[in-house]
Image (cartoon, helix red, strand yellow):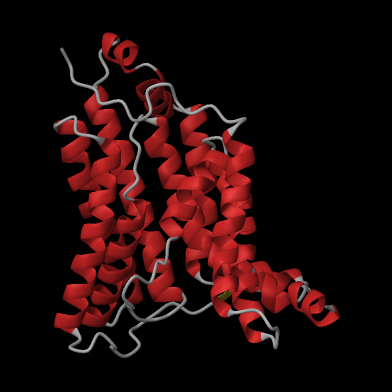
Amino acid sequence: MSVLIDLLVSTAFLASAVRLAVPLILAGAGEVISERAGVLNIGLEGMMLMGAFTGVVGADLTGNPWIGALAAALGGIAVAAIHGYVVITWAGNQIVSGLALNLGSLGLTTYLSRQIWDTGQQQSVAHFTPVHIPGLSNIPFLGPVLFQQSPFFYFAVAVAIGLGVVLFRSRQGLAWRGSGEDPAALDSVGVSVAATRWKALLVCGALAGIGGGAISLAQLYTFIENMTGGRGYIALALVIVTRWNPMWAIGVALFFGATDAVAVRVQALDVAIPYQISLMLPFVLTLIVYGFAARRGRPPAALGRPWMKS
């Protein structure tokens, strides 16, 4: 037990928790914006997986991880655009569309990865390495945890804070919130509900894609079939825990990242626990936290409801 406690308070464990939280911060913050605008995006997992795939393709073709990150964003946007046409333009069922996109993205990325890299076990591609911020990275304990991370971490924190400011302190944020609360009222003042929801969904798709790219380009340096491993679904629960505030996504994602890091660390210890049980830990804790948060949070009034202008 003492070995486990020492491991959980080590800088290596905490740095791992921060690293694993990055995709959740990005996807969660994007999903907050989408749901605030009234679009329920169950397809978050598919957008992350597509972003992880296109990010590796971009980095592999160009040898530049920054091009890979851009390709990851475009991959997420492509899946979000399909979702948008179904649920915004055609007023389709948002849950059915999202689930279909998750299954479709899994099948498409699996097929394409096997076609592109033959066996699906391609070599490591150009990737991001941790950035050591001068001065801050040398701070005892906190330095290795917070200031020796990949560029994705600093981008994710900046995005979550920036979206919080935009959502609650700008006209665009007011339009997003109005679209999710009372789209008829928003339409009555001359603001297009469809355009407002499209903007929110594409932002969500871009951030989810970059979140997937953070896994493939800053953690594993390659593409593996179904490599997102359900993180999109965890991000969906994260949105409810944050009570639809993107700034809170940072702290909540760090908690979920810590549970994921625990599951990884337990497997490294000589503990008589089947690895399948340790892999369940993040999802079990997600369900528990979700159960408490769901009773107190109030979703946007028009969330999941299609809108068609009369």
Q: Which residue is painted at 30% across and 10% down in the image?
A: 189
Tell me if residue 186 comes above or below residue 304 in the rendering: above
Quadrant the C terminus occupies:
top left
Quick one: quadrant of the N terminus?
A: bottom right
Q: Relative to 68, is 61 on the left or the right? A: left
Residue depicted at x 41% and y 20%: 181
At 25% from the left edge and 81% from the top edge, which residue is drawn? 60
Q: Which of 66 and 92 is in front in this view?
A: 92
Which of the 4 quarters of the picture holds residue 12?
A: bottom right
The image position of residue 128, as x and y in percent, is 44, 77
Give the farthest residue toward the right.
2
Q: Residue 230 sits in which quadrant?
A: bottom left
Quadrant for residue 245, please give it: top right
Residue 221, placed above or below residue 94? below
Query: In this view of the protein, can residue 181 be seen by the observer?
Result: yes
Look at the image and tell me whether residue 138 can be seen: no
Residue at 58% across, 67% down = 260
Residue 66, position as x, y percentages in the image: 34, 71
